[in-house]
Amino acid sequence: MTSDMTARTLRLLSLLQTRREWSGADLADRLGVTVRTLRRDIDRLRDLGYPVDSSRGHTGGYRLSSGTGLPPLLLDDAEAVAVTVALRTAAGGLAGIEESALRALAKLEQVLPRRLRGQVAALQGSLAGITWESRGPRADPALLAALAVACRDHEIITFDYADRHGMTTSRRAEPCHLIDSGGLWYLLAHDTGRDDWRIFRLDRITDPTPTGRRVPPREIPGADPAAFVAGRLSAAPTRYRAIATVHAPADHVRARTRYLATRIRPVDEASCRVDASDDSLTRIARTLAGLGTDYTLDADPAVLDHLRETARRILRATG
């Protein structure tokens, strides 16, 4: 009896973690018990420290809410493998949260069943990442978590934001999505003060404060947040201008430089124009070298000087 009760309580906890709210009838039916027995099981979870909220009436139900501490979570096999691989990847490749990811990974791997460790090892062994350059810490775990909750709950927040020139302004916005692009994190939000969509780099956000005001979800233009952010980033001002007219079809170039998709414009069936402008001369040179075909270049003098010096160094090294 005690064993059955323990198993049922764990099953109840697992169900509560998979849906925002359950009706008492649905939970009782899933567990194969009466509503009265369900109430006793809910009380046991509360005694163990799980904050289970309940509401009465015809539409009443149960939901697992936030509390003062983090109680144990139940993961099925697929979830445990996915979280472990994600934590290993974050620990080695996502700037700013490596230490937090390592601590969480150590706790999870300590209790990971042996039958799952082979799956994790196989997945991790087949994954690889390339870091082209070190750009310093960019992702504050606490900020990521706070903004993710605001996006989920559609809660307006206020924060201070420093633009590319270092000028800080106070902002009030409705967070919608977090986007990772090239190792930098961006918040896509509707700026209530400017009544327009804006993209905020997380490393420039400080003092985020929830207002407690929730609003209905907004429809993102184009219904694709990643594409919307990519389009805005491609149109953002850059320090150095570099426009290449490439003697190859746009689809051919797009396949070789996927991250520049929104900066490639067809000229005709045999050529296209690529905007390789950037804040970094090194990245411009790398982008142009990766085109893999002939092109003509319209660029700032600083870009041309950098390319000529790079070419001279290559010739000296190979001559």
Image: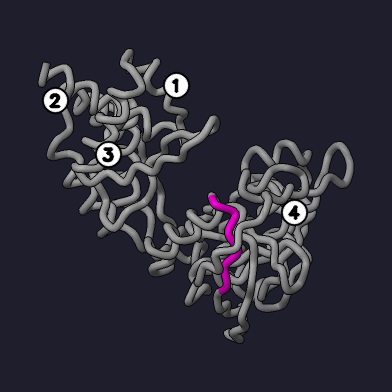
**Identity of the amino acid at label 1?**
Asp
Residues under numbered marks 1 and 4 in contact, where contact means CB atoms less than 8 Å apart: no
**Identity of the amino acid at label 3?**
Leu
Marks 2 and 4, the one that precedes in the sequence: 2
Residue on which disc 4 sits: 274
- Label 4 crowd (10 A; few <14 / some 14-19 / many >=20): many
What is the spatial separation of the Cα atoms under label 3 and label 4, in whole angstroms?
Answer: 48 Å
Residue on which disc 2 sits: 114
Quadrant in which residue 166 is drawn: bottom right
Residue 223, image x, y percentages: 72, 42
Closer to the eye: label 2 or 3: 3
Q: Residue at x 68, y 71 (%)?
A: 238
Residue on which disc 1 sits: 26
In the image shown, does 197 or 297 lie closer to the viewer? 197
What is the spatial separation of the Cα atoms under label 2 and label 4, in whole angstroms?
Answer: 50 Å
Span of residues in magenta: 153-158
Tag 2's secondary structure? helix
Tag 3's secondary structure? loop
What is the spatial separation of the Cα atoms under label 1 and label 4, in whole angstroms?
Answer: 56 Å
Q: Residue at x 29, y 34 (%)?
A: 42
Closer to the eye: label 2 or 4: 2
